[in-house]
Amino acid sequence: MKKFGKILFLSTMMFLLAVGSVFSADLDKLQENVGAFAEQMAKSLPFNSTMGLNWSSAYIGKVFPSIPPHFGVGATFGLTFLDVGDMNKMLGMFGSGNDIGGLGLGLPLPGYTVEGRVGGIILPFDVGFKIGALPEAIPLLNALGIGLEYMLVGGDIRYSIIPDKIPVIRASVGLGINRLNGGISKSLPGQEFAFGEDFTLKVDDPTIGLRWKTTCFELKAHASAKIPLIPITPYGGLGFSFAKSNAGYAIDSNIKMIDKDGAEVVNAKAILEELKKAGFSDIDVSSDGIESMYDNNAWNLRVFGGVSFNLTKLYLDFTAMYNVFTSNSGFTFGARFQL
């Protein structure tokens, strides 16, 4: 858990390095470069949302009729990696000499879930549930003016395609759904953003950050095998999914538009009209600030596999994942009690 906290803090600092560099720039450059990063982020979110419930056992057995009834509870911690190319490009265009190298695989996006699975009744199926969340108040981050949001919920149902009388090999097909919401923000001093030829946007003590969310529907196939006399279970599978995602940035503040003569406009509708005239099509303005979100609806194909060490009723899972369409990779570790 301590190591997971360090990874989360590292990822937070990487994001804020980007945010701090970007929000001193002209609005058109902000839109262009954060937009490219947000688009990449939106493509990577579905893969991140599939962490959790990748148990070694392709099917855990029935809860009834079965003695003992089959169920399990546990937790999973993991990382998926985001291509840092767009982020480094963004930093470079704003005069930052700090490239983000991540861990050699990209920018780590951490996640965790607490999860459970229960066997089916009469028919050979099982059902899993997972949830991961962070509290709104994290003292260390709050003291630095940093806000962090993370919520991952999901579930699946799997149907065994191999009879229970064959105990060594398990295989199943299933359907899962995952919902991921996240974001990171930073309170900053007042900022000014130039746009067009005649206007400047002025924001007072803004909170500026990145936001993202995705809903992912996945078809899964999973196989596992128990090695006789050795407490190890190798496993692997495929997940084919469709996801609706979006990501972008937000500036939460009172917004003022100043023209070349120094006159101020505070009406959100008038500000938005001027931004539209200047070519900003993917931006919204309200009395609460500015938001720009980018949608991405896409198919994804992931492969996953690993091994679990079985210590009586305690299972330790080590899983690697790879997204075929986006070339993202990921790794998770899980521990669970299972009957």
Image (tube, rainbow, N blue to C red):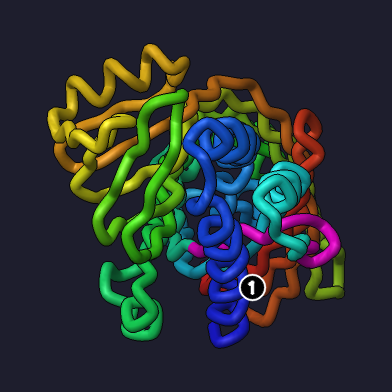
- Residue 67 visible in this rendered orientation of the protein: no
User: Viewed as shown, does residue 97 lie left or right of 113?
Assistant: right
Q: Residue 110 lies in what quarter of the image?
A: bottom right
What residue do we see at 44% from left, 61% from top? 115
| Residue 83 spot, x, y in % from top left | 75, 46
Q: Residues within 10 Å of mark 1 (few under 14, many from 20)?
A: many
Assess whether residue 104 is covered by the magenta stretch. Answer: yes
Could you say where residue 13 lies in the image, as x and y percent from the top left?
Answer: 57, 70
Element under disc 1:
strand
Q: Measured along the vertical axis of the image, is residue 219 above or below residue 26?
A: above
Q: How many numbered marks does the figure carry?
A: 1
Residue at 27%, 16% (x, y): give it.
Answer: 273
Q: Is 68 or 322 nearer to us in this picture?
A: 322
Give the quadrant of the N terminus. bottom right
Query: Which residue is more in the foreground, 328 or 304?
Result: 328
Q: Which residues are magenta?
A: 100-112
Q: Which residue corresponds to mark 1? A: 315
Front one among 96 and 99: 96
Q: Is residue 147 left or right of residue 107?
A: left
> In this view of the protein, can residue 138 be seen by the observer?
yes
Residue at (25% x, 41% y) in the render: 289
Q: Position of residue 41 (x, y in %)?
A: 59, 40
Q: Quadrant of residue 86?
A: top right
Please state which of residues 247 and 327 is positioned toward the viewer in this rendering.
247
User: Mark 1: which amino acid?
Assistant: Tyr
Q: Residue furthest top?
A: 277
Residue at 18 percent across and 42 percent down: it is 288
